[in-house]
Image: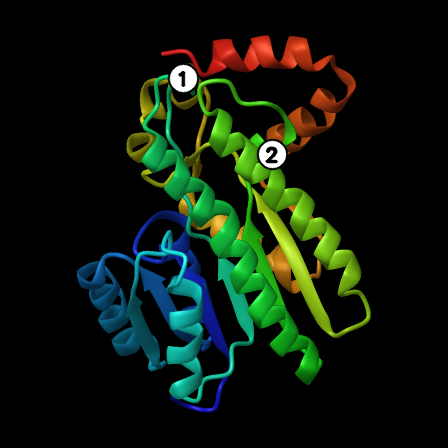
Amino acid sequence: MKQYETALITGASGGIGYEFAKVFAERGVNLVIVARSEDKLNMLADELKNKHQIDVKVIAKDLSSAQSVQEISEEIEEAGIQIDYLINNAGFAQFGKFADNDWQRESDMINLNISTLTHFTKLYLKKMISVGKGRILNVASTAAYQPMPMMAVYGATKSYVLSFTEAVAAEANGSGVTVTALCPGATKSGFGEDSGAGKSIMFNNFSTASSRSVAEYGYESMMSGKHSAIHGILNKIAAVKVRFLPHRWVTKLMMKVLDK
């Protein structure tokens, strides 16, 4: 690959990750894009290489697998690529009551949303600090700010991502490396359909942001070195307000909002 800056983006085959790939490509940054769907990744890679004359490495991998992060890291190292930007975007949710949901899917969710993100951050934060530069962005969610009945495990994983990222960001101060948590609200990204939450009041009675606007906001927030960034003024207001309300009230409200 060319000796230019390179961004590693997980979950790049669709939604916010797909738009992140475009945002970086438009700025002349080479890419390593990762997701399960090799066909979708190859189509995106061909488009971006032809349009922006950048190098794009495709890695098709199930990121919920415990070995995936180490395997991807080794493949990148063998290719002689230095990662300057890490975008931990991959993640998914499951809608429904915790008692009724499939355990294997929830286990995979915990592995992907928490373990994989944490392992990638561990590996590349250390590498970035050693060279004195780099930026990491972890995609959390406004779900991180309150309990999420009907999406209990997902909300808990995103609370972890936000707390973890802000803590690591503070540790990295002065190292030349920044770490940012991006917290989007409901987004037109295929998330609602994939999770089963697409028919809920949240996705049908409230405006949803475009994946492109979320990716652009995330990029700018990361480049400015923010520790956390909530997309959308209404989402920012809501995130602040819930901190001053009893959790019992907030949980009841979220149950209604996420009701089908």
The residue furthest right is 174
119 vs 84: above or below: above
Which of the 4 quarters of the picture holds residue 133? bottom right
Distance (Cα) linking label 1 and label 2? 21 Å
Q: Residue 125 placed where, x, y %?
A: 63, 69
x 29%, y 77%: residue: 49
Q: Residues within 10 Å of mark 2 (few under 14, many from 20)?
A: many
x 49%, y 86%: residue: 4
x 39%, y 71%: residue: 72
Side of 150 where 164 appears, left or right: right
Residue type beneath disc 1 = Ala
Task: Give the numbered dot on residue 99.
Answer: 1
Which of the 4 quarters of the picture holds residue 175? bottom right
Which is more N-terminal, label 2 or label 1?
A: 1
Query: Of 8 and 223, which appears nearest the observer?
Result: 8
Q: In which quarter of the image is the C terminus?
A: top left
Can residue 230 be seen by looking at this rendering?
A: no
Q: Which colour scheme is used?
A: rainbow
Residue under numbered circle 2: 144
Task: Give the numbered dot on residue 242.
Answer: none
Q: Residue 186 placed where, x, y %?
A: 46, 32
Dot 2: element:
helix
Dot 1: element:
loop
Nearer mark to the viewer, of 1 and 2: 1
163 vs 223: above or below: above
224 vs 147: above or below: below
